[in-house]
Structure formats: structure tokens, C-alpha cells
Image (cartoon, rainbow, N blue to C red):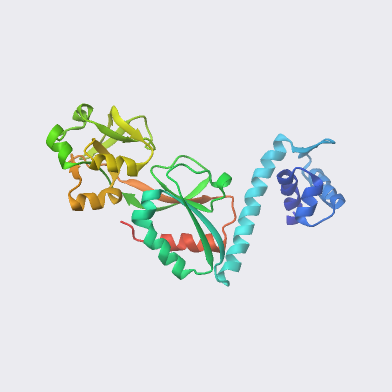
Amino acid sequence: MDIKVLRSFAAIIDEGSFANAARKVGISKSMCSKLISDLEADLGTRLLTRTTRAVKPTAIGLSFYAEVSEILARLDAATEAVRAASQRPSGPLKLGSPVQYTLKVFQPHLVRFMEEHPDIQLDVTLDDGRSDMTRDGFDAVIRIGNLEDSTLHARKLHDARIMLVASPGYIAEKGSPDSPAQLRDHHCLHYTNLRGPSTWPLRHQNEVIYQKITPAFSSNNGELLRSLAVAGKGIALAPEFQVADDLAQGRLVPVMADYALPGVPVHVLYSSRKLVTAALASFLDFVGGLNLD
């Protein structure tokens, strides 16, 4: 089957009309219409519903579009990969990354990536939320935590150590809990981006305990929670990279060290349907060679 036929069919659904699709593919409207008619005749089924106002896919046409889009994306990616092998990576690369993770862990690696690839225009958005890759135009995002099912490709970077911490002043006043159940009697500073409603995962030997807590304070910003813990306002669940300086300076101390928390995975995500440009391929190769443990 001629690839131009598939591109024309996909363009009609993407653009919503034969005229716009024809311009996108670079053929006449009449030729575009003929290609689709021949395609439907060849397949023995109607792929599009045509009215005077719009062109829409039939149910089987929509299913065919999903498969065709995947084929075209892979073909484009393969073509780009061959071109990239003989070209110096260049062009824009938009990344999304958590705020504190970027500042505390990933920043020096971004600097080195810039030095190794001076022709790539890096655009990094710091955001602790769950950005929508398609809507926000990201080529890749860094995510901390267990991944939800999706159509995105994932490349694991490492596991981030998570720990319970509090200020020495808080421990002197309230005491230190010895077991997960005792957390119910303490002021807990809860990070709301954690999956699960007010539940902290704690590991003792080979058992993971999911301890329900009643937060004294909740926020989606880990830096705010860290500052409250330093101020003696409670016990916080925090990534080690975020509190390492406070631990070294004695502003915070570990709590319930025998209940080590499961490491939280950190991944780079990128779309399975979006073209992998030379810039993105270079970034993926770069992070794949990092040792962040």
C-alpha cells in the first residue's frame, strides 16, 4: 500500500477536511479524494463519513487510523534516526521536571548536557504537578513515583530514597515514634502528591506497612513541608535529596530509621506516538548513561 495513501487518510482525520489534508500532504484535493475512495474500495469498507459540513471517521475507520498513525510514527522515527546518525543534534527540546529534584539532583547534569550539545535549545519547565505532555508540548518529562498505566515510554533513572525526618526540637518536645502506629499521636506533614489518601508506606524487614495518618498540615509543595519540619512543626516524609543539607547541618534528624521506606522510582517519560527527534534521542542516550544512585 502506497505510503502517500496512508498519510492522506491520517491527514484527513487530523485536519478534519479533504482540502486541509491535501495541502498538508502536498497533493490536490481531487487526488486526495480519489486515494481515499480507492483505499475504501481496496479494503471493502467505508472508513469516512462525509457530509457537507465535516468529514469524520467511522468506527472501523477510527480503529484503522490508530494503527496507521502508529505505523507512520515509527516510520518517521526510523527516518529521523537515520538522519540523526549523520547530523549533529540541534533544535528545541522541551522538558518538564520536578522543582527540588532538578535543583538538588539534576541541575549539574543539565549543565553537562548543554555543554555536550551546544546546538540544542533546552527549555526546562519546573513543575511538581502532573503536566500533560501533549497539551503542554513537552518532548519528555521526569516523574518521581510509581507510574500509572499510559501509552508513554518510560526510561528509569534510579530509585530516590525517602525518609521520615523531624527537627531535634520537635523530638525533644514530642518524643520520637518507635512504630508506624505511633504516628497517629504525632503532627504529620503530608505531601499531597503522594498516591493514596493520607497514607505513608513504611518498610520493616520484608514487609511494607501502609500507615494511615491524620495530617497536621498538607501541601503539594515539598519545600514548604521541609521548612515546616525544620521549624519544628512535625514529622515529614521527604526525599533524601531534599533534606540532605538539613541532616548534615543538624537541622533535621532521621525518624524511625528501622522502618526504611521503599525507594521511589524516577523515570524519564516520552510519547510513543510523537516523533523522536535527534535532540530527544541525544537526551535519552545521555540520561541512560548517568549514575544517579
Q: Can residue 262 be seen?
A: no
Q: Nearer the viewer, residue 209 or 256?
A: 256
Instruction: Give the percent coordinates (x, y) of residue 63.
Output: 67, 40
Q: Can residue 37 be seen?
A: yes
Instruction: Give the percent coordinates (x, y) of residue 171.
Output: 15, 37
What is the number of callouts on the image?
0
Give the vertical position of 197 relative to 164 (above or below): above
Q: Nearer the viewer, residue 155 or 47?
A: 155
In the displayed structure, does residue 2 sit left or right of residue 164? Answer: right
Q: Residue drawn at (79%, 41%), measured in percent from left and top?
A: 44
Image quadrant for the N terminus?
Answer: bottom right
Instruction: Give the percent coordinates (x, y) of residue 136.
Output: 56, 47
Q: Residue drawn at (26%, 33%), measured in percent from left and top?
A: 188
Instruction: Give the percent coordinates (x, y) of residue 155.
Output: 44, 53
Residue situated furthest right in the rendering: 30
Q: Nearer the viewer, residue 116 or 56?
A: 116
Q: Nearer the viewer, residue 48 or 197?
A: 197
Q: Residue drawn at (12%, 37%), measured in percent from left and top?
A: 172
Q: Residue drawn at (51%, 51%), measured in percent from left and top?
A: 270
In the displayed structure, does residue 155 sit left or right of residue 75? Answer: left
In the displayed structure, does residue 47 sit left or right of residue 179? Answer: right
Image quadrant for the C terminus?
Answer: bottom left
